Amino acid sequence: KRYLDPDEPDYLKARDIITKLPSMQQIVATNNEEDLEKICAERGEYVQGIFRWITSSCSAQLVSLSGDHRLTSMGTKFQFLMYSASPEREQAFVTAKRTHGSIFAFHGSPIENWHSILRGGVKNCSG
């Protein structure tokens, strides 16, 4: 049986693992991959595997927005842009955006769907 089973989500177990992951400060301060693997292994049985999966399966990048790129209606200075596509896909999007335009949209979805959305994008399945 899997520790984290998508058919029977256990968010407390997931939170337990996530809180044990190394911080960004620890990751940046680590000199090599072996030291990082050791830190993860010391934090619990599943931490190393989850960390390895996160870092190897997600190519998304978060970029902090500043100045006129922020949405004033959001009312916060902490706004980010997520690049979740390959450079080739991003370029195809930029080209299509020049032709057809673009809008900001907010999508509410249960947390268990985020993995698929972040890796494959939001799909319009309404016909």
Image: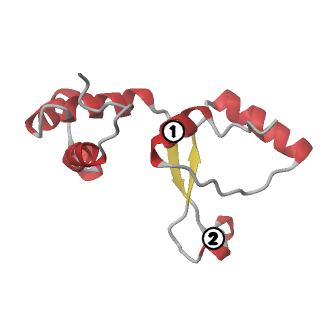
Earlier-in-chain disc, 1 versus 2: 1
Mark-to-mark CA distance, 1 and 2: 22 Å
Q: Amino acid at mark 1?
A: Ala
Residue 123 position within the rendered picture, expressed as x and y whole percent measured from the top left: 69, 36
Q: Amino acid at mark 2?
A: Gly
Work out whether 22 lies above or below 54.
below
Task: Assess disc 2: are there few (<14), some (14-19) or many (≥20) residues with their C-alpha within 10 Å of its C-alpha.
Answer: few
Residue 118 position within the rendered picture, expressed as x and y whole percent measured from the top left: 54, 39
At horizontal 53% and vertical 52% (from top left) the residue drawn is 63
Work out whether 2 lies above or below 81.
above
Instruction: Say which of 80 and 15 sits in front.
Output: 15
Residue 34 lies in quadrant: top left
Q: Which mark is drawn over residue 44?
A: none
Q: Which residue is mark 2?
A: 67
Work out whether 78 lies above or below 93.
below
Residue 25 position within the rendered picture, expressed as x and y whole percent measured from the top left: 26, 52
Q: Which residue is mark 1?
A: 60
